[in-house]
Amino acid sequence: MEPCLGAGAAGRSMAGALPGAAALRADPLLTVTSQTATGAERREKPLRGHGHKDTASADPQQSLREALSLLGSDDWETKEKGLFSVKHLAGSHSEVLLSRLREICLAVTSEVANLRSKVSYSAIVTLEELFLTLKKDMDSEVDEVARVLLQVQCNCPEFVEKAASQTLGIMVENVTPARAMTALLDSGVRSRHVQVRKCAAELLLSLMEKIGVTKLAGTARAERLVHAAGTLAQDCHKDTRHYGQEMVKMLMNHQKCKMLLERSVSAHDLEDILRRIKKKGMEEQKGEHPSVKSPVKKRSDGSKKPQATLPASQWVKSTSDGCLLHRPKVQVTLPPARDETETLQNLYNLLEAKGFEARMEGVALLLELCKNSPKLITTNIVQIFDYFVLRISDTHKRVKQMALDVLAEMITILEDALNPVIIRLVEGILKNLNSKDPGVHATAMNALEASIDHLDKVSLMKEFSHQWSQLSGQALLDVTERITGMASLSKPRGLPREYLQGRPVNRQ
């Protein structure tokens, strides 16, 4: 069996049919395909083949003790037997679990991070059964369980990620809404992982719709939720941004929440969020849904490569420490102008591909498009950055370095056309300046220097000050030195003294 961080083809199915979940499965958030259900049934068979029966235990207390003992074993198959026993007891003797609920949840939750993907999956569906049967009795365990399940949203096989998403949805449906909301705000909104923020945003939106803005406005959590909505509405990922914008729309319809929103988000940012919401609403009314903005199917790693790209090995050579040395110029044949939509879709496919080499090809294609079709890029820069910004913070070092290297060249080519995405551009550069890897830090510095040389200095200085809290150590010194240098050279009118002295400025 493959470990959680390196699952093969067998890890492409997701947990499906679970006892008592039929009513919840109708919810779009928790929908499971028939193919997924088949995979779940296959995975249940080994658990049921260990001599367990779906009948009530003669001595549930003894069964619980045995289950906890099995979970303490070092053998993964024995752990799986213990997880099935707990799941079985939850369905047949749920009252027995209440006296030792804390101990049970800790034992089961610790197996979610098991490197055996089958054990991880079994732990997740066991937690799902606990939420389905114990409901609000699970309130005390929500914080820890939500934190662990959200972490599964990255670096695990697809079927494990989907099972975790489904269990989080069932958690939200069954526990006290206030507890679920607090857990998501604590563990999801501020995560550095895109998929974690996306999952948390989707669940928070469903909670807002379930509770209602009027009721939320009178709670102590209103201010935190409002601040989170404003943050998510400006996220780098388009789906997360969509959920955040939907939350903002709901909040703006309530006078108290509207006041909190205006207090939590800067006037400039709130104006930008509302403008985007209005634009989206107008497009929906007119039925304008350009195909380049619709979801596209992800390419498999072995799929045919577009003619407009070249192998990543021809673009980047790296030393043993991963530093970029040279990227030779290559002639790339671009599609005709009438195929611009298809070109963009190919670009998006590559930039969000699973394989790192395919993602590097996407970064390479973006640079070629900047050189040969700058108008196409500038016209769609916001949508393109939705995908490209993910590569600037890619988990693979070579992809990240190449993206930062290409970003520096994009800045010199496009210059002020990058103003609509300057917030995310600066954020991506500053995060990588903190990197301890010398190659990543060096490419981030190149991008920083390019931005200072070619972008609007007033906007840059404001964004550097707004995102000051992200910096530490040498990165803080580097940016301080450059902000001070920019101020001494340009001294633009209308800027507060704090900007000119290179000090952070609060957005509020």
Image (spheres, rainbow, N blue to C red):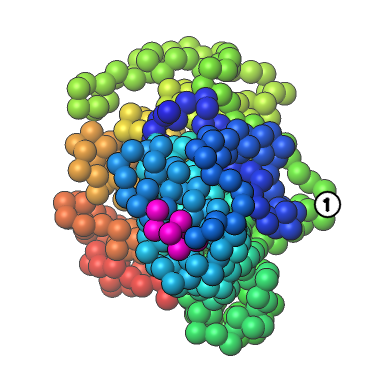
Q: Could you tell me what secondary structure mostly forms the magenta stretch?
A: helix
Residue that protrudes farthest toward the right in the picture: 286
**Position above or below: 18 against 376:** below
User: Is 430 on the left-hand or right-hand side of 372?
Assistant: left
For image coordinates 19% across by 36% down, the residue present is: 438
Which quadrant does the C terminus fall into? bottom left
Q: What residue is pinned by disc 1?
A: 286
User: Is 333 on the left-hand or right-hand side of 465?
Assistant: right
Return the x and y of residue 167 as percentages of the image width and height: 56, 54
Q: Is residue 316 magenta?
A: no
Please state which of residues 271 and 471 is positioned toward the viewer in this rendering: 471
Q: Amino acid at mark 1?
A: Lys
Secondary element at image label 1: helix
Res. 364 in view: no
Q: Is residue 62 magenta?
A: yes
Report the span colored magenta: 60-66
Question: Which quadrant of the figure has residue 74?
Answer: top left
Res. 57 in view: yes
Return the x and y of residue 149 as percentages of the image width and height: 46, 54
Return the x and y of residue 45 as percentages of the image width and height: 58, 35
Disc 1 residue crowd, few under 14, some 14–19, many 20+, Cα 10 Å? few
Please state which of residues 463 and 73 is positioned toward the viewer in this rendering: 73
Question: Which quadrant of the figure has residue 99?
Answer: bottom left
